[in-house]
Image (spheres, rainbow, N blue to C red):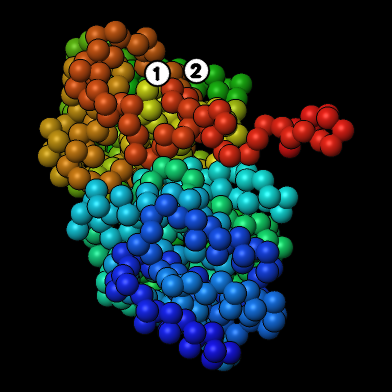
Amino acid sequence: MGNIRRAARETTDRQVDLTPRVSVLTTVFDPEPAHLAACLASVDAQTFTAWEHVVVDDASTNMAIIELLKQNLRQNRRTTRRQSNGGIVAASSVALQESLGEIVVLVDHDDVLEPHALERVVSAFDAGGNAVDVVYSDHDILRSDGRTTTPVYKPDFSLERLRNHNYITHLVAARRTAVVAAGGFCVGFDGAQDHDLLLRLAETGKAFAHIPEVLLHWRQAPASVAADVGNKVYAFESGRRAVAAHLERSGIEATVDHGDHAGIYRIRRKVASGQRVSVIVPTRGSRGRVWGVERIFVHEAVASILGDPSDCEIEIVAVLDSGTDPVVERGLRRIAGDALRVVHYEAPFNFSTKINLGVSASSGDLLLLLNDDTEVLAPGSIDEMVALAQDPAVGMVGAKLLFGDGRLQHGGHVYNGVVSHALLGWPGDHPGPNRLLAVERECAGVTAAAALVPRSVHNEVGAMDPSFAINYNDVDYSLRIRATGRRIVWTPHACWYHFEHGSEPTSVSKAERELLEARWGEDLRRDPFYNPNLEPNRVDWLERPLMSGAPPYEVLPDGRLSWG
């Protein structure tokens, strides 16, 4: 099939534009001819015209594919045929080597681009300047009946989430020089070559820009992962090894296993020796019934902490309101012994002030801020949070919290016009939209009902602001931590029950809300880990109406309406 290559080279020699801005890279191996034709046509239809299409046929056996590639030679499309099938890494490496553009865009042989896809990509690179090396977009699924469905509306760049699974997938574009410098497509990672490449590009420290728009339709072909994750089980093992290699290069000592869902990875970081965690528990010794049994909340909270296996040294700092029943302190001393420090608080209730007093009396380099109406559910929860907080780029770590009935209370904060908890009230074992509750990920903020903060970060941001006595103290605290450039990470692997409102006032102060708005304004409406294609003022990841591209109904030949 050398004629294809020779004809392409002859065409290239006659080109007027010597250097295209964008190189679309597509490797081909025996797709459905109609699917490949649609892919090629979608590239031809681009509104941005300074592109080349570098196609590498990885020794397809279907003569219809070979003939189709011959028929679709263009001035700006080159086709190379490999003499033997070497897999997607080998074919992609050839495509990268033969590309000329400043920007490379990865498109599978059965994917379909939106007509303005390349235009949007180039605009994003231009807007980001030299700081941006990678641009990615939202995508949806192209069904076998030709309809689009299941849009994947992604967050802005989330390094921790990328480590847990390849949430980016399609559409991906990158500077060719950055891809080459990162080592290109690496042998041994077939099926997860894009995940491996994204992780290596993330290690450079250059920015990833996100276009919150569906620019690519991922074909639900019979043999694709889009149709059945079981089609390419080997890809998930490649992904696991890619994550492990990335962590090793990043100096993070950890093991990586397959998670509870296909394509999700379970990272277990090693906790450094000698870690001392001070658990700061404000309390007034409240009582209540949980699962039909009367309890003193703080006793159960502390007992569950000390009963949780940990490689860290644990210190309990209880900040007790004046007038607290003496039985509360006596019980704490029996439960915690020498691990306990007690701070007496004499002023009107102020959660922020109580936390700050507890921190001042503590000795640990890591601070676990904890409500007294909690109980550890997942073994090793503190160590999970400590392991993440060891990264100097992480400013705070939040935990998964469940109501007593098992519903989700906290999956990270959402600031999208409302200030609330992600997927509040969902089943506690639900993985969430696009698996967001099954993975460690960056959030706009997390609740101080169970949050781990390095003491150095707490001191740097000036502690908690007493102006927020009851509400929004953790929102303000989170935003100030993010303003330092640090990441806030939520993990599902640290989990507590939170019997919310068992021990603190619940009224929302108008003054506190007005202060939060005055201080943070637009930050309360632009959550980088949400998506503008989702409904604002909600926490359930509901799509805006008519955004998916799939019609709500279709007209059947007999005139009746059918809803998909």
| Badge number at residue 503 | 1
Residue kind at label 1, given as amino acid type: Ser
* Labels 1 and 2 touching (C-beta < 8 A): yes
Disc nearest the viewer among 1 and 2: 1
Cα distance between the residues tagged 1 and 2: 9 Å
* Quarter of the image where one finds residue 337: top left
| Point 50% across, 50% down: residue | 114
Using a 10 Å C-alpha cutoff, classify the residue at mark 2 as few (fewer than 14 neighbours), some (14 to 19) or many (20 or more).
some
Residue drawn 44% across the image and 43% down it: 213
User: How many numbered tags mark residues here?
Assistant: 2
- Quarter-of-image position of residue 226: bottom right
**Residue 289 sits above or below residue 559 on the image:** above
Mark 1 / mark 2, whichever is N-terminal: 2
Q: Is residue 101 visible?
A: yes
For the C terminus, the image quarter is top right
Please give the name of the residue rendered at 65% of the width and 79% of the height, measured from the top-left corner: 67
* Mark 1, secondary structure of its residue: loop
Return the residue at label 2: 288
- Residue at the outermost right position: 558
The image quadrant that residue 20 belongs to is bottom left
Name the residue nearer the viewer: 62 or 393: 62
